[in-house]
Every structure is written in structure tokens, then in C-alpha cells.
């Protein structure tokens, strides 16, 4: 590795350490950190992009902002949906990164993902369904200010 790469890795490690130290000061980030699959960096990034829940009128508007709300594009006999374009790309990517780990770590999400794949949905469509469900869970967690609860299968 070039010498500059080691310096960059050191800077990244230092930034991650700073994120870990400031994370407890954000109640939103602390709650997100309780969700399986969310790491310190992902929780901090998503919390920073969401800001405050008062910005959103409903769970559906948060889902649209995070890019997990498919929009109808049906016309006549054609039925279909499309991915919204008015999303926050950074928040969407942070949620997508956490979703991959969340599906792997949570049996309920694994079951939902598997069900959608068996129905013929693509990987991205199935992840979007799990993401929408997780968005509902996050909305309730933040509204009630309580951490994620693991429930028996």
C-alpha cells in the first residue's frame, strides 16, 4: 500500500472514533443503534440526514424520503411501480447498508425477504419491502422514544 493510504486509514479510524463518542448525545442515533444491523456510522449518518421527526407528517413521508416507498405508475392495463426520485440519496444508502445486515441478523426480516423472493420479486424489490417495514418500526420507535425490541419468532 502507498504511504498515503495508511494516513487515510488512520484518519478514517479517528473519525469513526469521534462518531462513537458523539453518538450518545443524539437520542435519534442512539435509538437507531438499537436496531440490529445498524452500526455507529450508519446510525449517525441516518440520524443526521433525518434530523428531526417533526419534518415528516407521517410514516409514509419518512419512507418516501428514505426511498423505500414505491410509487404507482400504472396506466390502463399496465400495472407497475417505480422508485421515487425525490429521496435523500445519502439517507437511502445508509438505510440500504443497514438493511443488508438487518435481514441477515433478524429472523422476521429474513422470513419477509424470503417470502417476497419466492413471490418472484427481485432482490432490490424484496429489500425495499423489508425497508418499508423497518421504516414503520423506526417511525414507532422514534415517536414513542423506545429502543428496538427483539421479538420471538
Image (spheres, rainbow, N blue to C red):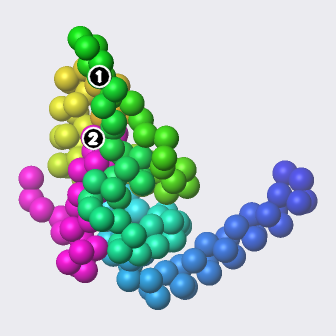
- The residue sitting at 34% across, 26% down in the picture is 73
Let me know if residue 138 is in the magenta part.
yes
Q: Quadrant of residue 75?
A: top left
| Quadrant in which residue 118 is drawn | top left
Residue where numbered disc 1 is placed: 74
Q: Residue 85 got which mark?
A: none
Where 90 falls versus 84 (above or below)?
Answer: below
x and y percentages locating residue 126 in the rendered image = 30, 34
Q: Residue at x 32, y 71 (%)?
A: 34
Q: Which residue is under mark 2?
A: 129
- Position of residue 9 measured from the top left corner of the image (x, y, whole percent): 74, 63
The mark nearer the N terminus, 1 or 2, is: 1
Residue 45 in percent (x, y) is at: 52, 66
In the depicted structure, whether residue 104 falls above or below residue 72: below
- Residue 76 relative to residue 23: left or right: left
Mark 1 or 2: the one toward you: 1
Question: Taken as a whole, is the magenta stretch helix, strand or loop?
Answer: helix
Q: Residue at x 30, y 65 (%)?
A: 57
Q: Looking at the image, which residue sits at the far right? A: 3
Q: Are marks 1 and 2 in contact (CB under 8 Å)?
A: no
Left or right, 32 with reference to 148: right
Question: Which residues are the magenta region?
Answer: 127-153
Spot the residue most to the top: 77
Give the spatial CA distance, label 1 vs label 2: 19 Å
Residue 91 at what x, y percent from top left? 49, 57
Q: Tell whether position 97 is magenta.
A: no
Q: Is residue 147 left or right of residue 51?
A: left
Q: Residues within 10 Å of mark 1 (few under 14, many from 20)?
A: few
Between residues 3 and 52, which one lies in front from this camera angle? 52
Residue drawn at point x = 90 percent, y = 59 percent: 3
Q: Quadrant of residue 6?
A: bottom right
Helix, strand or loop at label 2? It is helix
Amino acid at each position: 500500500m502507498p504511504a498515503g493510504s495508511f494516513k487515510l486509514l488512520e484518519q478514517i479510524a479517528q473519525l469513526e472514533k469521534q462518531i462513537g463518542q458523539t453518538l450518545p448525545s443524539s437520542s435519534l442515533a442512539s435509538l437507531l443503534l438499537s436496531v440490529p444491523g445498524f452500526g455507529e456510522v450508519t446510525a449517525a449518518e441516518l440520524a443526521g440526514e433525518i434530523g428531526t421527526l417533526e419534518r415528516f407528517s407521517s410514516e409514509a413521508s419518512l419512507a418516501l424520503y428514505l426511498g423505500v416507498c414505491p410509487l404507482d405508475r400504472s396506466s390502463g392495463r399496465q400495472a407497475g411501480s417505480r422508485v421515487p426520485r425525490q429521496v435523500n440519496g445519502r439517507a437511502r444508502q445508509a438505510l440500504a447498508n443497514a438493511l443488508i445486515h438487518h435481514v441477515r441478523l433478524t429472523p422476521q426480516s429474513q422470513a419477509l425477504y424470503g417470502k417476497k423472493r419466492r413471490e418472484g420479486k427481485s432482490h432490490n424489490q424484496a429489500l425495499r419491502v423489508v425497508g418499508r417495514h423497518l421504516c414503520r418500526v423506526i417511525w414507532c420507535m422514534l415517536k414513542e422514544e423506545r429502543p428496538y425490541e427483539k421479538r420471538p419468532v
